[in-house]
Every structure is written in structure tokens, then in C-alpha cells.
Image: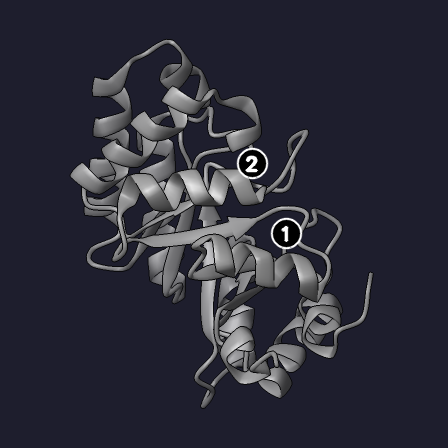
């Protein structure tokens, strides 16, 4: 039997669409309160609004940096993180530079992660790999660099590229990072069966916009 309380407590209820309005954010936050999700994940312009809407709530506000391409400079990503912190964010998911990783530039990726961790000033940093664009060795390398440079989580995907989370990728990430590191599965998680499969594979957090349908057990 599914423990819905435990499942909800692992979900970042997500709305990162560019056309999102304040009414959409209000709905997102109300749903997160009602279902006791771990957090809401919103674009930077909505951090202050979400913090206000979730005042006196345990629901955390998560935002993104370098999203969705990961191709901005390290300085730009760090500044985005600093502004997010000023606005009240509680966790930051940032997209690593996929091109630099694919060309084997480990020094650049290590610097990027360590600079983002420093800019976050102690708040949890999740490194988004965009696994659909990477080979197995590149995924393993990115995971190792995340561990070595102070990140708290590795996250599979933005949900804006050509593929999202897969059970195989979550298993690979979990095997690489070990039992105690955070693993966030995100992208394409639309129903309870898939959500539970991701958790079984080793995910400790789920990022999804279909959170309510997942908790209710409804296909969407």
C-alpha cells in the first residue's frame, strides 16, 4: 500500500512554464499546502510571491538557475542564485554546462558547481545533469564532480529537453553517488506508478507538475 504522506513529502510541486501567471502560482502554492508537498519549484520572478503565499507553512520554495539550457556563464548563474537568496529561496536547482561536460572539461564543471555552492551560502544546491543529452560515463563524471564540490543533490532533467527521468538513469545515479546523497528525478513523471518506480530506483525527491494527480492516483 502506498504511503501518500511519505510520497507527498518527497515532491517538489513544479511550475516552470514561461506563461505562468500569479494566479497559477497561487494555485500551485494552495495545492502544495493542501497536500503537504515538500516544496514548490518556481522561476525566479515568483520566489517572493511564493514565499508570501506559503507564509506559516512548512512548504519550501525552490527555484532554478541557468535554466533550462545551462549555457550561461558561471558568473551569471551565481548572480541568479544570489538574487534568488535575497528574494527568499530555500533551495536552488541549477543546470550544469552540458557542452563543457561533453567536451570533458572537468575543471570547468568543478568550478561551476563549487562557485554555485559558495553563492548559495549554505542552501542546498541540486545539479541538473540533463541526462537525455549525456552518455553513461558523462553522467557518472557529473555525479562525482557534484559530490566532490559540495552539491547536495543530483537531478536528472529540466523537463525542457528531449527526454526526462528514467528508472535506469536514477539507478545509475544512485549507484554512483552512494546511499546518502540526494537524487531528484524530474521530467516526465506524470502518474503514481512512475513516481513510485523512481523512488524504488533511488530517488529521494521528485520534481513534477502532476503532483496532485500522482497523490490521487489519477493518470494524467
Q: Earlier in the sequence, mark 1 or mark 2?
A: 1
Disc 1 to disc 2: CB gap under 8 Å: yes
Residue 42, x across and y down, in percent? 56, 58
Residue for point 56% across, 57% down: 207
Residue 52, x across and y down, in percent? 51, 79
Q: Is residue 14 visible?
A: no
Residue for point 59% across, 63% down: 196
161 or 43, nearer to the observer: 161
Question: In the figure, is residue 146 to the left or right of 33?
Answer: left
Q: Is residue 118 visible?
A: yes
Q: Which mark is residue 68?
A: 2
The correct choice, above or below, for 106 with respect to 74 in the image is above
Residue ID for mark 1: 16
164 or 200, nearer to the observer: 200
Badge 1: residue crowd in 10 Å (few <14, some 14–19, many ≥20): many
Single out the residue that lies furthest toward the bottom.
56
Residue for point 37% across, 16% down: 100
Amino acid at each position: 500500500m502506498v504511503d501518500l504522506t511519505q510520497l507527498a513529502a518527497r515532491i517538489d510541486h513544479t511550475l516552470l512554464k514561461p506563461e505562468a501567471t500569479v494566479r497559477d502560482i497561487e494555485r500551485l502554492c494552495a495545492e502544495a499546502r493542501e497536500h503537504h508537498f515538500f516544496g514548490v519549484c518556481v522561476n525566479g520572478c515568483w520566489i517572493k510571491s511564493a514565499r508570501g503565499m506559503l507564509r506559516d507553512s512548512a512548504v519550501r520554495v525552490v527555484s532554478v538557475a541557468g535554466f533550462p539550457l545551462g549555457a550561461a556563464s558561471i558568473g551569471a548563474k551565481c548572480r541568479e542564485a544570489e538574487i534568488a537568496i535575497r528574494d527568499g529561496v530555500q533551495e536552488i536547482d541549477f543546470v550544469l554546462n552540458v557542452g563543457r561536460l561533453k567536451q570533458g572539461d572537468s575543471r570547468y564543471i568543478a568550478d561551476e558547481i563549487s562557485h554555485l555552492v559558495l553563492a548559495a551560502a549554505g542552501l542546498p544546491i541540486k545539479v541538473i545533469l540533463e541526462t537525455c543529452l549525456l552518455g553513461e560515463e558523462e553522467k557518472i563524471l557529473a555525479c562525482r564532480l557534484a559530490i566532490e564540490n559540495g552539491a547536495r543533490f543530483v537531478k536528472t532533467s529540466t523537463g525542457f529537453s528531449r527526454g526526462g527521468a528514467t528508472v535506469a538513469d536514477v539507478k545509475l545515479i544512485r549507484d554512483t553517488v552512494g546511499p546518502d546523497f540526494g537524487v531528484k528525478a524530474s521530467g516526465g513523471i506524470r502518474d503514481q506508478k512512475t513516481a513510485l518506480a523512481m523512488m524504488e530506483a533511488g530517488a529521494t525527491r521528485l520534481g513534477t507538475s502532476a503532483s496532485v494527480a500522482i497523490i490521487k492516483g489519477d493518470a494524467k
